[in-house]
Amino acid sequence: MSKKILVTGSNGLLGQKLTDLYRNKTDKKLFASGPGADRYPHQQGYEYHSLDIKDRNQVFQIIETLKPDVLINTAAMTNVDACELNQKECDELNVQAVKHLSEACKLHNVHLIHLSTDFIFDGTHGPVTEEETPNPLSYYGHSKLKGEEIIKASGCKYAILRTVLVYGIVNDMSRSNIVLWAKQALESGKPINVVDDQFRTPTLAEDLAMGCFLAEDKSAEGIFNISGPDFMSIYELVERVADYYGLSKENLNRSDSNSLNQPAKRPPITGFVLEKAKNELGYEPHTFEQGLELISEQIKNKVSV
């Protein structure tokens, strides 16, 4: 019998990387799901189901019908400023929907793998371990922490995977991320201002997908840090993109977070210690430059897998 995996949010960056990973595995059966139509370019090797996880009845119905062994929840409202400005919408997806999923997983004995974030921390220091005490600065951070607490209290079997600043590309993504933005901005030759007072361990989307796979495959339980291994400021990140692609840094200017006037506060320093994931899951992330190399290959090959 194939192990049945249900992925929510499968049209997103991580969701599509999970489809890449799972769709042709003979010992796993993948059910991909998201609101609306399937956006994955190669529609074979898995089943797609339209699902709005904000609808409790839909959640319970799909789990009862498909009977998955594992549910990987990649769906979330992740735009930090949008969460600050639209708190009701943020709660619906990051809190209430998580409640529906965890209750359905408990009822049907499904292993829930849930994605969380470094933004549950206040950023006074880093990199941090899984034992660090959360203290979110933004509504987004608060909503993701509430989601974690709901899962822990639900009684379902769970693994919570926290991650940091995910980057990568897929075929149809119009949405940019920090690496693609940096490359395009540097190529434009126009002056760009980049903060040098925020520090992260940026995460390649393929590595995050592999972290989910390892947690699923090993039936892991508990909290795991899943990120890249390299700790750097956002300014250094853009410098490293410039160096990798041989682009001029002449128009790259340092700035600080206060100059951005963003609605939501960001934690100054996060980043993760990865020893637990490495030791317990066998997690081995790419270095930042290896991640850039993979993205370069995908751009050349138009990402198709």
Image (tube, rainbow, N blue to C red):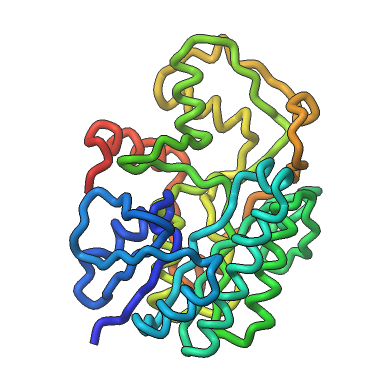
Give coordinates of residue 137: x percent, y percent: 79, 50
Foreground residue, 156 or 219? 156
In the rendered structure, the answer to whether residue 47 lies left or right of residue 219 reads: left
Is residue 19 visible to the viewer in this orientation of the structure? yes
In screen coordinates, is 38 left or right of 180?
A: left
Where is the N terminus found, in terms of image quarters? bottom left
Foreground: 37 or 76?
Answer: 37
Depicted 293 relative to depicted 132: above or below: above
- Residue drawn at point x = 32 percent, y = 79 percent: 4
> Residue visible at 21% across and 52% down?
42
Q: Position of residue 273 (x, y in %)?
A: 62, 58
Q: Is residue 139 left or right of residue 240?
A: right
Q: Is residue 275 visible?
A: no
102 relative to 216 in the view: left or right: right
Residue 243 drawn above or below residue 209: above
In x, y percent, where is residue 113? Answer: 50, 72
Quarter of the view holding residue 261: top right
Q: Is residue 217 above or below residue 286?
A: below
